[in-house]
Image: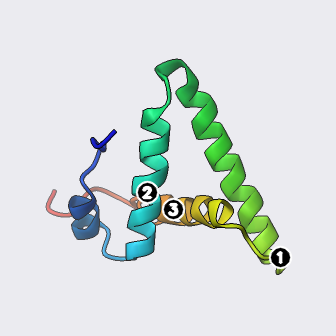
């Protein structure tokens, strides 16, 4: 699955707060979601979001995260940075 709903370069332009790690998390998790069967995608999304929340909680307690947990936490961070407050620029 190589097609993403939004090109990473466009995300970089529109959301300059995104780090390279944020973009990589977006790419990896989004490909995982889109690579699932259409009927399974809601479950994969739920599991990804829940896993990211659990990872954040673990990190807040000072617990080390495994690579997959860190990825999901970074994905949530990236998604939070992409939430607009108001209309897109130029409109």
Q: Quadrant of the N terminus?
A: top left
Q: Position of residue 80 (x, y in %)?
A: 51, 62
Q: Position of residue 7 (x, y in %)?
A: 24, 53
The disc, 3 or 2, on the residue closer to the chain's N-terminal end is: 2
Label 3 neighbourhood size at 10 Å, few (<14), some (14-19), many (20+)? few
The residue wearing badge 2 is 26
Left or right, 90 with respect to 77, comes to left
The residue wearing badge 1 is 63
Disc nearest the viewer among 3 and 2: 2
The disc, 1 or 2, on the residue closer to the chain's N-terminal end is: 2
Colouring scheme applied when the structure was drawn: rainbow
Please tell me whether residue 1 is drawn above or below residue 90 in the rendered image: above
Task: Identify which residue is drawn at 62% across, 46% down.
Answer: 48
Task: Identify which residue is drawn at 49% across, 50% down.
Answer: 29
Residue 80 badge: 3
Residue 36 badge: none
Q: Outermost residue, bottom direction? A: 62
């Amino acid at each position: 699955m190589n097609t993403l709903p939004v090109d990473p370069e466009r995300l970089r332009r529109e959301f300059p707060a995104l780090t390279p790690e944020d973009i990589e998390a977006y790419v990896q998790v989004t490909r995982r979601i889109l690579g699932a069967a259409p009927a399974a995608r809601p479950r994969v999304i739920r599991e990804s979001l829940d896993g990211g929340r659990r990872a954040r909680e673990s990190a807040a307690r000072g617990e080390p995260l495994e690579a997959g947990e860190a990825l999901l936490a970074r994905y949530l961070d990236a998604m939070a940075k992409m939430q607009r407050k108001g209309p897109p620029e130029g409109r």
